[in-house]
Image (cartoon, rainbow, N blue to C red):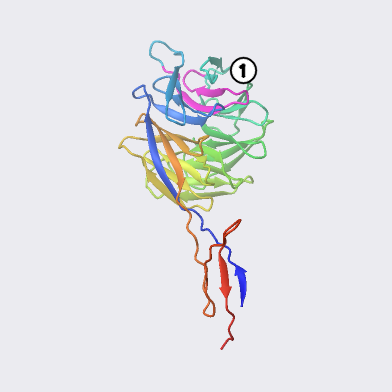
């Protein structure tokens, strides 16, 4: 007779989610994009309210009005927003042809862009301490760079009618962007302005947002294509169809659970896709939610905006209690669980060896 310590294996926890919603004070604010701020809060743009919003992880919302570029009625077209290397939030003004900066205390500064045909859309921090943004306007069709001091440089995209929208930095310090227009491609630009473009297999897919995935690949949404796309750093593209038809995938982010999370503007759902392409969808409460921008929050949860629902949503990534796996019992042995007194407790296997027949 002898004793062997049994290792207690714990199965992988099953993910469960809860969706909370917080109403934006200004009605029909037209929330667009959202990002995690340097202050532990979430910051978002409000297109119709012409404001920048801030929400704490407890759901307290504050709004900061942006001066109208075309008073009394013309809206600035607030779109993208990101945290800058200077500890401020930076955002784009699609209609006003400006890049804006707001401190975490709400102090605003705006920088006019040099080209009157600019239409800045998305914005992200680059490898050089500057902010990089997409210029959606077909006549300009460029990727822009703005220093934290407001100096702007633009790089014209080789292909015409590319209408770039989303933009993100990869692990190599390059910027990747979506060509939502006639280019129907994913583009890459180095910090020195050298372009590469990779055509998307699905025609007229309208790629919108893009993010860096946990697998060292880029993941993007295809609004009209109804796909989630993945592109390696060498340009190899794989597409995964979204189960809900005509869902119009909007924006995408990497979650704390190692999966990608995306919004479905028409599908009124939040989607989750693993790095091997398995998709799960979660309906958003309300018939008119239209979830659009999405980001991973400082609390480890997923946060998104509802363009029509006028709410900020929070997907709580909860884990169910782990379940113990029962060890296999052989035909010639038995398992005895004993609680040992003293410094610790353990499972002990007492196995009586018997001759094989």
Q: Residues within 10 Å of mark 1 (few under 14, many from 20)?
A: some
Query: Magenta residues, as a range?
Result: 75-97
Q: Residue at the far bottom: name it.
A: 357
Between 228 and 87, which is closer to the camera in this rendering? 87
Q: Position of residue 98 (x, y in %)?
A: 53, 18
Q: Residue at the far top: name it.
A: 72
Decide whether residue 201 is among the magenta residues: no
Q: Residue at the far front: name it.
A: 342
Q: Position of residue 271 (x, y in %)?
A: 43, 44
Decide whether residue 77 is among the magenta residues: yes
Number of numbered discs on residues: 1
Can the viewer see residue 3?
yes
The answer to whether residue 300 is left or right of residue 353 is left
Residue at 53%, 66% (x, y): give it. Answer: 338
Between 262 and 228, which is closer to the camera in this rendering? 262
Callout 1: SS = loop
């Amino acid at each position: 007779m002898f004793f062997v310590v049994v290792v207690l294996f714990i199965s992988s926890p099953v993910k469960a989610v809860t969706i909370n919603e917080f109403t934006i004070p200004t009605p029909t604010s037209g929330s667009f994009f959202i990002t995690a701020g340097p202050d532990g809060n979430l910051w978002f743009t409000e297109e119709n309210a012409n404001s920048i919003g801030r929400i704490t992880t407890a759901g307290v919302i504050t709004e900061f009005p942006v001066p109208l570029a075309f008073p009394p009625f013309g809206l600035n077209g607030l779109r993208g927003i990101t945290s800058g290397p200077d500890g401020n939030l930076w955002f784009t003004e699609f209609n006003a042809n400006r890049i804006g900066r707001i401190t975490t205390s709400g102090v605003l500064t705006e920088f006019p862009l040099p080209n009157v045909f600019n239409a800045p859309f998305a914005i992200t921090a680059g490898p050089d301490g500057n902010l990089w943004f997409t210029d959606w306007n077909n006549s300009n069709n460029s990727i822009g760079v703005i220093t934290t001091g407001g100096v702007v440089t633009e790089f014209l995209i080789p292909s015409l009618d590319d209408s770039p929208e989303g933009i993100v930095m990869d692990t190599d310090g390059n910027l990747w962007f979506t060509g939502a227009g006639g280019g129907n491609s994913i583009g890459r630009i180095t910090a020195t302005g050298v372009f590469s473009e990779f055509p998307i297999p699905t025609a007229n897919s309208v790629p919108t947002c893009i993010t860096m995935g946990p697998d060292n690949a880029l993941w993007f949404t295809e609004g009209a294509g109804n796909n989630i796309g993945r592109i390696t750093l060498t340009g190899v593209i794989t597409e995964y169809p979204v189960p809900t038809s005509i869902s119009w995938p909007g924006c995408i982010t990497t979650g704390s659970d190692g999966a990608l999370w995306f919004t479905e503007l028409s599908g009124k759902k939040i989607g989750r896709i693993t790095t091997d392409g398995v998709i799960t969808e979660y309906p958003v409460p309300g018939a008119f939610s239209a979830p659009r921008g999405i980001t991973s929050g400082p609390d480890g949860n997923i946060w998104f905006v509802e363009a029509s629902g006028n709410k900020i949503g929070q997907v709580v990534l909860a884990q169910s209690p782990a379940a113990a796996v029962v060890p296999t019992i052989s035909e010639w042995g038995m398992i005895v669980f004993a609680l040992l007194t003293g410094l610790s407790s353990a499972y002990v296997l007492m196995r009586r060896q018997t001759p094989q027949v």
